[in-house]
Image (cartoon, grey):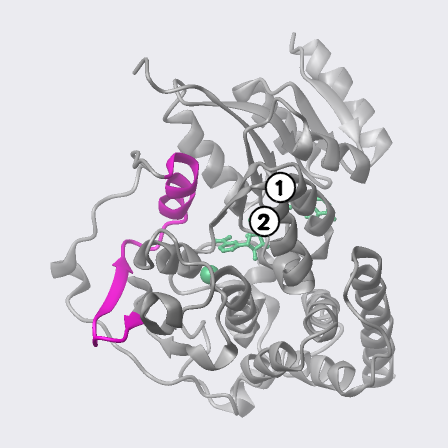
Amino acid sequence: MSHVSVQLVTVLGATGSIGKSTLDVIARHPERYRVYALTAHTSKEALLDQCKAHSPRFAVLDDDADAQWLQQALRQAGSNTVALAGQEALCEVAQAPEVDTVMAAIVGAAGLLPSLAAAEAGKRVLLANKEALVMSGALFMDAVARSGATLLPIDSEHNAIYQCLPSEHRGGLAKHGVRQLLLTASGGPFRGWSAADIANVTPEQACAHPNWSMGRKISVDSATLMNKGLELIEACWLFDATPEQIQVVVHPQSVIHSMAAYDDGSVIAQLGNPDMRTPIAYGLAWPERIDAGVETLDLFQVARLDFEAPDETRFPCLRLAREAMQAGGAAPAVLNAANEVAVEAFLAENIAFGAIPDVVAKVMALPYPGQADSLERVLAADRWAREQAAHTIRQLTA
Ligand code: NAD
Ligand code: MG
């Protein structure tokens, strides 16, 4: 297809679940996409294999020694890819002038600076890294507006809502005849469980999601419903919505990825098999459509769609996130950081699953003195909440 120009793509977090799915879609369309840079935290062998397959100009790891190892291995393989290390290199490959598109798929607060760098540089930003938006929603959306970046949500629910809204939807939902956003949730692996049984599940149980295969942090977030809480905050920023305009609907089949309800009674939904390559392909090709390698949904096999209300007593994280968004300021950054520390402690088997919401609630209840009106202040709130969460966990385990 001669009318299509080749997009140069940087994949931040290339070795993760979203990163791998992104490279799978890219590999299906060599005439459309070429890889400019791939990044990973510590998985140097996986990154080396990806470099051999995709020949990026740059590959970035966290640590200098790892990058030296990678550079040597690349040279031995006859590759011209240049290996770099550290946070600054991450930001450079996200904002380089040659780059058209950045897939922001680093997990957690670690993704904030490079995701923001891509937004500030006016890229097509495919945003999977929801934590970046939760921490710094106002700053992030301002950067997008100022630079003229194209922000396309990759989180399946937000991608679905994006597809269900009019193409111009800024300026508040009411202006566009939208009454409510219906954010669907699978309910996670412990949906029907009693609070007592949920309290002591293992990391393996928490990471075994019924419908989606994902990284460990988001899998735990899905099990606590903090993922839905983070997504509620994410939706508020992406679609100019208030928390009250968003209804969470538990839908165990994960076939409807979310919906928009209009003033005239219409409810528009986006459906599909639960496979992240669909929203990724949507983001890469928008406003066109390309093959994602995903089968068409077989409704006869799905047979039925169920819906229920979320239970915020057994899953308090959803309520905590809504309260953080309503409080505004630094509260979402504090919530996010406390959650990241609590999830890490749970995965390291230092605290019980049931203690995750307790840690977040304790940190949220402490008065945070600062604001979140600059990047420095957001990062300060993040550091403060991490210290408070670590302290709370030490008390719990003493
Ligand atoms: P993952 O754990 O599978 O992968 C994370 C990637 O980030 C890896 O490449 C890792 O090397 C890199 N990384 C981790 N820590 C880093 C650090 N400190 N510095 C630099 N790089 C670092 O995670 P995932 O499941 O692919 O999720 C990535 C993001 O996408 C998360 O924000 C998640 O919430 C979001 N997301 C994921 C899914 C999914 O289906 N997996 C769906 C929706 C949203
Ligand atoms: Mg999601």
Find the distance from the CA under tag 1 to the CA under tag 2: 6 Å
Q: Magenta stretch? A: 261-286
In the drawing, does residue 86 fall left or right of residue 136? right
Q: Determine the residue located farthest toward the top in the rendered image.
A: 78
In the drawing, does residue 71 fall left or right of residue 208? right
Please determine whether, in this image, residue 117 is positioned above or below residue 274: above
Please determine whether, in this image, residue 187 is positioned above or below residue 373: below
Q: Which residue is located at x 31 percent, y 37 percent?
A: 293
Image quadrant containing the C terminus? bottom right
Rendered location of residue 342, percent (x, y): 72, 72
Q: Which residue is located at x 62 percent, y 30 percent?
A: 38
Q: Which residue is located at x 65 percent, y 7 percent?
A: 78
The kind of residue on which mark 1 rests is Ser
Which mark identifies residue 333? Answer: none
Image quadrant containing the N terminus? top left
SS of the residue at dot 1? Answer: helix
Q: Which residue is mark 2?
A: 145
The kind of residue on which mark 2 rests is Ala
Which mark identifies residue 147? Answer: 1
Please determine whether, in this image, residue 365 is positioned above or below residue 207: below
Rendered location of residue 232, percent (x, y): 51, 71
Is residue 111 visible from the viewing direction of this image?
yes
In the drawing, does residue 174 fall left or right of residue 146? left
Query: Number of labelled discs?
Result: 2
Is residue 86 visible from the viewing direction of this image?
no
- The answer to whether marks 1 and 2 mark residues whose Cβ atoms lie closer than 8 Å is yes
In the drawing, does residue 84 fall left or right of residue 273? right
Q: From the viewer's side, name the closer residue of 30 and 167.
A: 167
Instruction: Assess whether residue 281 is covered by the magenta stretch.
Output: yes
Rendered location of residue 394, percent (x, y): 86, 78
Q: Quadrant of residue 174?
A: bottom left
Q: Quadrant of residue 350?
A: bottom right
